[in-house]
Amino acid sequence: MMDDCLFCKIAAGEIPANKLYEDDDLLAFRDIAPQAPVHFLIIPKKHIKDPAHVTEADEALIGKMMRVGAQVAKENGVTDFRLVYNNGAEAGQTVFHIHMHVLGGRSLSWPPG
Ligand code: AMP
């Protein structure tokens, strides 16, 4: 748990979130500013700053984020979805606790903005 980390506080239950999935390792919750009909975030409860700070010891945890993200997408009625990690402010990262966006429920364009 990192002080002054919004997503650590959500993981600890100190700040409310609209939770879709939770276990000892991960939490999924709806994005507060959804960019698609289905838009939720998967976070590890462990504080990792961003993808650039993932270590070998985190590999199973990061793989689990993908598996659970796909499972929760299916539970929310989407079979086609996009997974996004922003790394660094220039790439659009605003919360510096690693999170995987899961976006679906509408047609998504490529390339992204
Ligand atoms: P990023 O820009 O990749 O760092 O993504 C951060 C995401 O967190 C944004 O899509 C925000 O809308 C979302 N967000 C920020 N605060 C909250 C919150 N309290 N609950 C849920 N989502 C949040």
Image (cartoon, rainbow, N blue to C red):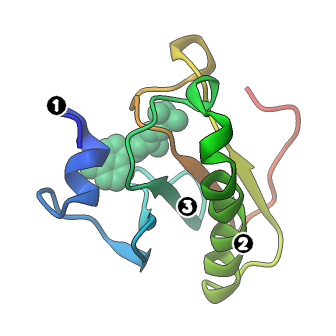
- Residue that mark 1 sits on: 4
Tell which of 64 and 21 is nearer to you.
Answer: 64
Residue 72 point in image, percent of width and height: 61, 78
Disc 1 to disc 2, C-alpha distance: 29 Å
Q: Position of residue 73 (x, y in %)?
A: 66, 75
Task: For ligand 1, give the image quadrant.
Answer: top left
Residue 31 in the image: above or below residue 75: above
Dot 1 crowding, Cα within 10 Å, few <14, some 14–19, many 20+ = few
| Residue contact between numbered discs 1 and 2, judged by CB atoms under 8 Å | no
Give coordinates of residue 27: x percent, y percent. 42, 66
Residue at image coords 61%, 33%? 54
Does dot 1 land on a helix, a strand or a loop?
A: loop
Q: Which residue is mark 2?
A: 70
Residue 76 found in image quarter = bottom right
Q: Secondary structure at mark 3?
A: strand
Q: Quick one: label 3 or label 2, which is nearer the N terminus?
A: 3
The CA span between labels 1 and 3 is: 24 Å
Q: Which residue is mark 3?
A: 39
Q: Is residue 83 left or right of residue 52?
A: right
Q: Is mark 3 within 8 Å of ligand 1?
A: yes
Where residue 1 appears, as percent x and y from the top left, is 23, 43
